[in-house]
Image (tube, rainbow, N blue to C red):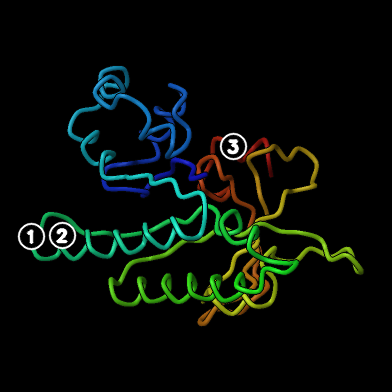
Amino acid sequence: MGVLRAGLCPGLTQDMAQLLRSRGIKTVVDLVSADLEEVAQKCGLSYKAGALQRIQVVRAFDIFQMLDVLQDLRGAVSQQVSSSSGTLKVVVVDSVTAVVAPLLGGQQREGLALMMQLARELKTLARDLSVALLVTNHMTRDRDSGQLKPALGCSWSFVPSTRLLLDTSQGAGASGSWRMACLTKSPRLPTGFQEMVDIGTWGTPVQSPTLQGDHM
């Protein structure tokens, strides 16, 4: 579930995100489900509420719905380009495991093929439309070693160009919103780099001075 953070859409600053959270609007789903005119009045927002309306949430409960959504998105973006009415910046799939995992295992031999079809569609969408694609994948533990591994296995590990592992912090004083982000795959940067981030504001301790004293 996408957490509201600065830069998610035009006009959404860190101060505005904090103001929205104080009114009980903490995620993208909360935002699009709310009455934006009422939100604008309560939070003292004006033109910035229009920028928030550019965030759209589409619910897909299986892989076939997901593929249909991506096809519709491609068509909608093509119309935007021809009419110059707007530009798509980022697509978030949360989570790919929810629509793919039910197809894997047992006698469902078409599951892997459908998963790779979805992977090709996502990569093609990113390339053809020049948009950023953020896909979340759950973690599971290996049955033999007990080590954490991506839920969709090795086949999916080749799909993303960049992978970040978010793990709960076990340090003293760590709260539920803090995660250890570890770069596990990148075409440009060395892997293994780690950073503590607050997913409530999506900032590091240096970027979130109000929280620094509590979590450093």
- Mark 3 to mark 1 CA distance (whole Å): 44 Å
Residue denoted by label 1: 83
Packing grade of label 2 (10 A; few <14, some 14-19, many >=20) is some
- Mark 2 to mark 3 CA distance (whole Å): 41 Å
Sequence-wise, the earlier of marks 3 and 1 is: 1
Residue denoted by label 3: 211
Q: Which mark is residue 80?
A: 2
Q: Where residue 5 sits in the image (x, y, percent)?
A: 43, 43
Query: Left or right: 90 with respect to 81?
Result: right
Query: Label 3's element?
Result: helix
What amino acid does circle 2 point to?
Answer: Gln
Picture quarter with the C terminus: top right
Q: Where residue 42 sits in the image (x, y, percent)?
A: 31, 17
Packing grade of label 1 (10 A; few <14, some 14-19, many >=20) is few
Q: Residue at x 48, y 74 (%)?
A: 117
Query: Label 1's element?
Result: helix
Query: Left or right: 150 with respect to 99?
Result: right
Q: Residue at x 29, y 76 (%)?
A: 128
Q: Residue at x 63, y 40 (%)?
A: 177
Packing grade of label 3 (10 A; few <14, some 14-19, many >=20) is some
| Eye-nearest disc, 3 or 1 | 1
Q: Where residue 80 sits in the image (x, y, percent)?
A: 15, 59
Q: Which mark is residue 128?
A: none
Query: Left or right: 205 with respect to 192?
Result: left
Q: Where residue 212 sits in the image (x, y, percent)?
A: 61, 41
